[in-house]
Amino acid sequence: MDTSHGAPGAYLDNNATTAVALGVLEAMLPWFRESPGNPSSLHGPGEAAHAAVAGARQKVALLLGSVRADELTFTSGATEATNTAVHAALAAAPARRAVVTSAVEHPATLESLEARGAAVTTVPVDAAGGLDVTAALFAIESAGPTLALVTLLQVNNETGRIQDPHDLRRIADAAHAVGARVHLDVVQAAGKLPLDVRALGADMASLSAHKLHGPKGVGALWVAREAFESFPSLISGGPQERGRRAGTENVPGIVGFGHAAGLAQAFAADPLAVGDLAARRDRLEAALGAELDDLRVASAESPRVASTSCIEFHGIDGEAALLMLSAYGIQVSTGSACGSSHHAPSHVLLAMGRDAAQASSSLRFSLSRETTDAEIDLAITTIPGVIRTLRTLAGLPS
């Protein structure tokens, strides 16, 4: 990865967004000018667009595992998909207002629940980010017939922590036993793990194209056809997406999403490719640990996706480190991209037992299948000096 000035750079913020893969871009280009039809139009270009959307829908459905293509609704992204899932669960059963979620969810989930006035029970996590399953089951049993929804991340966007699939299934089974629906946010799992959302007990799942080398501005919500007798859509208007999401479909974006989904599925199913990515992450962590004292990797001893490393550097200000590293052409994050403008400690790390200073001294390094050894080398040679400088400025031993 090069910076805009041609100097060497290292883009290590792929959990925020990924570069569009070249093959994805090539698949999209014809649909901007050569084939401009509206998928709802009955003429030739419209029929071609309709077929292209249908083909992409099949590819994205395959990424999610054993789901039907006609259960998938294209959206503007995972935020809309998650908001739609929350809206649908609450609107389908107005007498049910209780929702169970976790303390480490994405802002798209937490803000959507707050905006809709749900009665939320927040399940804690342990120091490694693992769900307190006993607390989750107790919350579901306590809510009983008032429970509308359980909504959880499969993979945390800040730490890469993978929730145990057996735990997710137990929680889903308990929710179904009281008549509630289950939504999974699989944004950071898609393209990194082989997926089967039905096997996890989900009724709905959200994902996004731009997290797996597809274009921004397109995502999807999967809804099991048996989950709703009549689906309460979030966006009203025309009959597009089988009445679940009005508005003309983003054909170039959807085509790109479909192509990206196929590439992502192939990568996730290739243990050698995933192992190579994990090796790059591990090499970065080991090299920084050898150079710097008081370094702690979040969820290091727990199951993590190969792409993600959240590291606490004692005594520094994470935002200052981010800005200094950016000046050297290295892009990282202090947490979720959707929460970075709040200048507050990561709620995920706080929920894992870190104090505000520890959470604020953490940086997230997120790789992708396109991350190169040269990018890792640059990070290894640059980061220790930046951390030592910041520690010296703070009056701490470097």
Image: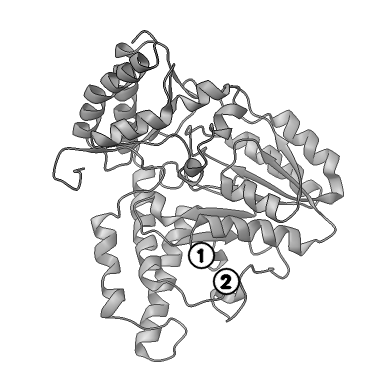
Furthest residue in direction top, as rendered: 397
The colour scheme applied to this rendered structure is one colour
Residue on which the image places disc 2:
245
- The part of the image, by quadrant, that contains residue 137 is top right
Horizontal and vertical percent position of residue 75: 51, 65
Residue 205 position in % (x across, y down): 57, 53
Residue occupying image coordinates x 44% and y 41%: 193
Pointer 1 residue: 75
Which residue is more in the foreground, 335 or 71? 335
- Closest to the observer, 56 or 160: 160
Q: Are marks 2 and 1 in contact (CB under 8 Å)?
A: yes
Task: Give left or right: position of 74 versus 99.
Answer: left
Residue at 64% x, 46% y is 110
Q: Is residue 151 visible?
A: yes
Q: CA distance from mark 2 to mark 1?
A: 7 Å
Decide: is 78 above or below 225: above
Q: Is residue 12 above or below residue 387?
A: below
Residue type at mark 1: give it.
Thr
